[in-house]
Image (cartoon, helix red, strand yellow):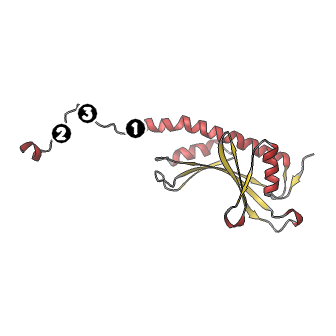
Amino acid sequence: MSTTHRHLSPEIVTEALQSAGYRVQAAPGAAGAPVLVSATGGLPFEVRFFNPLPPAGATGAAWADAAFRAAFRVQGDLPLSLVNSWNATHRFARLLLAGDTGASNAWLILEMDVIALGGVLADNLRAHLEIWDRLIPELVAWLRAELPKLAKAAPIAEPAAPDAPQAVAPDEAAQ
């Protein structure tokens, strides 16, 4: 029989990740909430904890939920319609576009929530990890297929060939 967790903690999630073969490191997070750092398929991701619960006794801090998050820097413009098309076909995680498109602060973020409020079985937590492990490479493959389509739909203007005649302004022609 699988253990039921009434909350999430870095220890619970670390144990689940390690039992699935992941390496995990704890890192300080914003406002005192811990962050776990790991990777799948060579791509880094974080687990962030949200909604702190009253102290869980000797087990330490407890949270109602956590989010698995992988962030990818966006170079150039990325239409929101592309992000929405991913979200329309994937139900367990969402894709977000953060920052200003085309700017150095633009990020594409894949997030998946895990909620423990009311109880989550250890086997269910393991299933979430398996879904996450499948989603990241699926996203990368999808982006590799979709981004070239964007480039073809909006080609970049090519510079004129060096031997092409150059237009001369009327003022220059008179000189």
Q: Which residue is mark 3?
A: 162
Q: Are marks 2 and 1 in contact (CB under 8 Å)?
A: no
Q: CA distance from mark 2 to mark 1?
A: 24 Å
**Left or right of residue 134, residue 87 in this image:** left
Q: Residue at x 48, y 53 (%)?
A: 104
Q: Are marks 2 and 3 in contact (CB under 8 Å)?
A: no
> Which numbered marker is on residue 116?
none
Report crowding for label 3: few under 14, some 14 to 19, many 20 or more residues within 10 A (C-alpha).
few
Q: Which residue is mark 1?
A: 155
In the displayed orientation, state which residue is furthest to the bottom: 54
User: Mark 1 is on which residue type?
Assistant: Pro
Q: Quadrant of the C terminus?
A: top left
Looking at the rendered image, the disc whose residue lies closer to the viewer, 2 or 3, is: 3
Q: Which residue is mark 2?
A: 167
**Left or right of residue 25, residue 96 in this image:** left
User: Mark 3 is on which residue type?
Assistant: Pro
Report crowding for label 1: few under 14, some 14 to 19, many 20 or more residues within 10 A (C-alpha).
few
Residue 61: x and y in percent read: 81, 64
Residue 15: x and y in percent read: 82, 50
Report crowding for label 2: few under 14, some 14 to 19, many 20 or more residues within 10 A (C-alpha).
few
Secondary structure of residue under mark 1: loop
User: Mark 2 is on which residue type?
Assistant: Ala
